[in-house]
Image: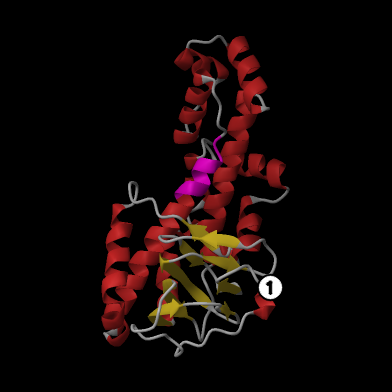
Amino acid sequence: MISQAVAGLRVGRGTIRRFRRSGAWGMRYSGLSGSGFHVVLRGTGWLVTADAPPVALRPGDVILITSGADHGLSDIPRPLRALPQAVMGEEQTESDPVEFEFLCGSYRLERGQVHPYLTSMPDPVVVSPDYGRFPQLRSVMDLLDADDSQLEGGTEVTRAAVLDLMLVHLLRQVLEDEESRERPVTADSAITAVLRVLHDAPEKQWTVARLGGAVGLSRTALTRRFTSVVGTPPMTYLRNLRMGHAARLLRESDVSLAAIARRVGYSTEFAFAGAFRREFGLSPGRFRQVNTGLPTSLEGARS
């Protein structure tokens, strides 16, 4: 789905530019249609939005703009409305003193819309790249830093390739970080082990007895400890985990309902649909239509 979302941006015009600022400075990006990112290369600054507290930026941080949200960059926290609109041609020369340096890459859509996968994400998102998990991201960052002037004057194919790689790797890290935050943190090693197996394989036909056997606890002991630590019994937690995973698949993919049912541990589409309706008050097909605009007649197209 990430690849499809990024592919949908290619109808827009791709740009990569370097900005250098010193002293009191600020710029506002508003009225955008598309996706992109800012990479902080040198110095410190602030990300400013209209509705959230300012976020401190340091070298290496990446501001991911998933679907064109209004935002600004500044030397100190300022109201977004107080920042001047960014003008792409106003770059400082290399001989000027530089206190803050960053790259800006974007796809600007003149026609069409950003993919629903991107519009469903927070916007903007500050990402501190994890090069241990995503070593390819460092290579793309190095390429951007070294060759942005050549890329800007180069071919559309070259520019699109670098933009694609950057967006894909950023989105993958954001998605993995989001999924890991959903798993409760506990000092109870047995409950941690149970949570791990549930998150790693929610589709398996788990029972309290099977989970307890995996960590050497009786059904009663596991239920008591799990409920005390997590706040819900094991099977309630598993049901909620499955429904959350199903909702993401419905919102972020065009996988068929039958395939989603199997992925979240239901033997039939009918059983899955009933459980989903009890949780969300909507059928899976209606949920997908409301959240993505995908016609229900197309649900069975992919498996």
Instruction: Choose top left, top right, bottom left or bottom right for residue 289.
Output: bottom right
Q: Which residue is mark 1?
A: 79
Q: Amino acid at mark 1?
A: Pro
Q: Residue at x 49, y 82 (%)?
A: 109
User: Which of the pair 298/148 is nearer the observer?
Assistant: 148
User: Which of the pair 66/272 is nearer the observer?
Assistant: 66
Left or right of 220, for residue 11: left
x, y (%) of residue 34?
51, 76
Secondary structure, mark 1, is loop
Q: From what the image shows, is residue 187 above or below residue 7?
A: above
Q: Which residues, given as a range, are shown in magenta? A: 176-183
Q: Residues within 10 Å of mark 1 (few under 14, many from 20)?
A: some
Q: From what the image shows, is residue 106 above or below residue 300?
A: below
Q: Residue at x 56, y 41 (%)?
A: 182
x, y (%) of residue 51?
70, 65
Q: Residue at x 66, y 74 (%)?
A: 80
x, y (%) of residue 3?
39, 63
x, y (%) of residue 55?
58, 60
**Quadrant that contains the N terminus:** bottom left
Q: Residue furthest bottom?
A: 89
Q: From what the image shows, is residue 93 above or below residue 242?
A: below
Left or right of 94, for residue 240: right
User: Which of the pair 95/143 is nearer the observer?
Assistant: 95
Helix, strand or loop: magenta stretch: helix
Q: Is residue 45 magenta?
A: no
Q: Residue at x 46, y 69 (%)?
A: 37
Q: Is residue 121 something that shows in the picture?
A: no
Q: How is the image coloured?
A: secondary structure
Instruction: Choose top left, top right, bottom left or bottom right for residue 191.
Output: top right
